């Protein structure tokens, strides 16, 4: 698999809490140069990034990030505000407290609240695999498949673990064919990226792959 194919699946990501507008503009320039799928950035930078890139680049942002324990109404408001500010794609974090309580209907409703606020935009649902049992992962594959979301995503990258090959394989095998898989967190090499894609990931949340592409040009 060549570098170009991998880059086209990358959400070039910068979610550090102290990232600056200048860093976000640099991220956008890099994503355009290397034809990445999107940039994934904090909500506070969406409006500025959209003004900067116009229609040259897809803008992705995160909702309920990174903990997911906000109320559904708060997530829906945050998502609607992000769309208003120019977000094309939304990566939301599920409510893990509801998952651990086994409140599956509430988990589904939480996702649907964001789905309703983002109609016409692409929605990815972050399930934070490193905090889940296998049974919980399977429940969430079903719930996300029924939610109307376009993607299920492994991780925020802010918890105790990121994407694993086992989790990507499990998600691809147990989600509906209409639901795509995004691997995120800890993708640090071209081999990681290629492995995740071969296991069924359609998107990769990472900043490292663009850096590797830049290093190859030096």
Image (tube, helix red, strand yellow):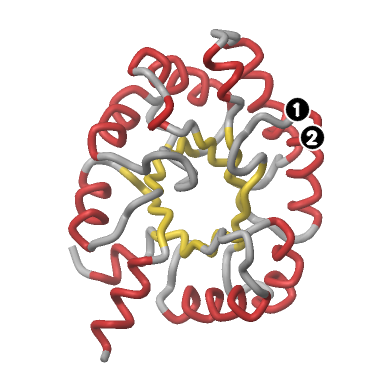
Q: Which residue is mark 1?
A: 71
Report the residue at 47% width, 79% height from top: 30
Q: Provide the secondary structure element on which disc 2 rests.
A: helix
Q: Which percent across, then down, holds residue 110? A: 67, 24
Report the residue at 62% width, 33% height from top: 68
Q: Between residue 165 and residue 80, name the one nearer to us.
A: 165
Q: Residues within 10 Å of mark 2 (few under 14, many from 20)?
A: some
Q: Between residue 53 and residue 15, name the one nearer to us.
A: 15
Q: Residues within 10 Å of mark 1 (few under 14, many from 20)?
A: few
Q: Which residue is mark 2?
A: 74
Image quadrant containing the N terminus: bottom left
Q: Horizontal placement of 15 versus 70: left or right?
A: left
Report the residue at 46% width, 59% height from top: 11
Q: Horizontal placement of 67 versus 73: left or right?
A: left
How far is disc 1 from disc 2 in space, using C-alphas? 5 Å
Q: Between residue 180 and residue 74, name the one nearer to us.
A: 74
Q: Which percent across, then down, holds residue 45? A: 70, 65
Q: Horizontal placement of 92 versus 34: left or right?
A: right
Report the residue at 33% width, 67% height from top: 209
Q: Provide the secondary structure element on which disc 1 rests.
A: loop
Image quadrant containing the C terminus: bottom left
Q: Which mark is residue 138?
A: none
Quadrant of the rendered structure where residue 117 is?
top right
Quadrant of the rendered structure where residue 129 is?
top left
Quadrant of the rendered structure where residue 171 is?
top left
State if disc 2 and disc 1 touch (CB < 8 Å): yes
Up/down of 209 relative to 173, above or below: below
Residue, far bottom: 218
Q: Which percent across, then down, holds residue 176? A: 40, 25
Q: Which percent across, then down, holds residue 31? A: 48, 73
Up/down of 117 relative to 188, above or below: above
Up/down of 57 relative to 110, above or below: below
């Amino acid at each position: 698999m060549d570098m170009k194919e991998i880059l086209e699946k990358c959400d070039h990501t910068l979610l550090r809490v102290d990232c600056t507008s200048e860093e976000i503009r640099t991220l956008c320039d890099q994503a355009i140069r290397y034809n990445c799928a999107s940039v994934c950035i904090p909500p506070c930078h969406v409006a500025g990034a959209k003004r900067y890139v116009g229609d040259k680049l897809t803008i992705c942002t995160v909702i309920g990030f990174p903990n997911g324990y906000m109320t559904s109404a708060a997530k829906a408001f945050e998502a609607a505000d992000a769309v208003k500010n120019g977000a094309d794609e939304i990566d939301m974090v599920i409510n893990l407290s509801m998952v651990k309580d086994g409140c599956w209907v509430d988990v589904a409703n939480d996702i649907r609240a964001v789905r309703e606020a983002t109609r016409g935009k692409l929605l990815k649902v972050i399930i934070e695999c490193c905090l889940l049992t296998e049974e919980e992962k399977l429940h969430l594959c079903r719930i996300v498949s029924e939610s109307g979301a376009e993607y299920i995503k492994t991780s925020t990258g802010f918890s105790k673990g990121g994407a694993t090959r086992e989790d990507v394989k499990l998600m691809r095998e147990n989600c509906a064919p209409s639901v795509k898989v995004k691997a995120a967190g800890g993708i640090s090499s071209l081999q990681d990226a290629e492995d995740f894609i071969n296991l069924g990931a359609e998107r990769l949340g990472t900043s490292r792959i663009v850096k590797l592409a830049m290093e190859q040009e030096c």
